[in-house]
Amino acid sequence: MVKEKLFAKMSRKKIVAGNWKMNLIAQEAIALVEAIAQLKQNNTAVELMVFPPAIYLQALKHTSLKVGAQNFHPAEKGAFTGELSLNQLKDVGASIVLIGHSERRELFLESNSFLKEKVDAAFAHKMPIIFCCGEPLSIREAGTALEFVTLQLTESLFHLSPVQMVDVTIAYEPIWAIGTGKTATVEEAEAMHKGIRAAIEAHYQSSVIADSVSILYGGSCNATNAAELFACPNVDGGLIGGAALDAASFIAIANAF
Ligand code: PEP
């Protein structure tokens, strides 16, 4: 059993993803992607990907890094002023999307049911996803973080078939740790990642499915704390905000594996 678990951990995809949010202008975005690609060298142990502002996707189309979109609208097309569809994002080079980042949930009021529509739209387009989940501080302090996160997964993700579920990447990002410099402890991160895996196993009645899903940690992860977080048995990489805006620290995080 221990051997099987170790094998699952080894065979799960290791990912370090940079969420650039609403930062940088074109020249800076191009320079950053080039610097990351150059520093990356032969590190094949971990898949690197970046999520620039969508207007720069086209300019980054030819990079060797995987490039994704931070947001999209689930409709095919139509009267959604200011939004972008999956077809449009694919057209300019996005090959993966974030869904449910806490800033989308909190600032733009995206609900679990709306996020479910996004999940379905992405699967209809065969677009890989990183599904973000995580609790606010009040829920953490109330001691109900795992229940809160499990509900997010249940209402947006667990309608997927087992075959679809193995293709999902999850990012656990406690909201109180995002951009605050306050990282979850390794014990807190591991406990939640283990809990998420147990919730997948319970729902799909399958440890194979649960062991196949990569679960990333996000929230003030940096070059100093990445190694201890990534050493946790259930942590398969990181979704990085602030520290992803500097090529050297982003690569140092990737090299923490
Ligand atoms: C994020 O917003 O996804 C994130 C993890 O941000 P930071 O690393 O800056 O906390």
Image (tube, rainbow, N blue to C red):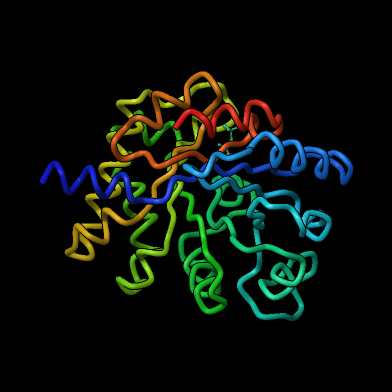
Whether residue 9 sits left or right of residue 37 in the image: it is left
Front residue of 235/103: it is: 235
Q: Position of residue 226 (x, y in %)?
A: 47, 27
Whether residue 241 sits left or right of residue 211 in the image: it is right
Picture quadrant of residue 39: top right
Front residue of 248/150: it is: 248
- Is residue 144 visible to us here? no
Q: Residue furthest right?
A: 27
Quarter for ligand 1? top right
Q: Give the residue drawn at x 35%, y 64%.
A: 166
Q: Position of residue 154 (x, y in %)?
A: 33, 61
Q: Give the residue drawn at x 57%, y 55%.
A: 98
- Compared to residue 150, the image places residue 134 above or below, namely above
Whether residue 164 sits left or right of residue 251 in the image: it is left
- Is residue 224 visible to us here? yes
- Compared to residue 187, the image places residue 124 above or below, namely below
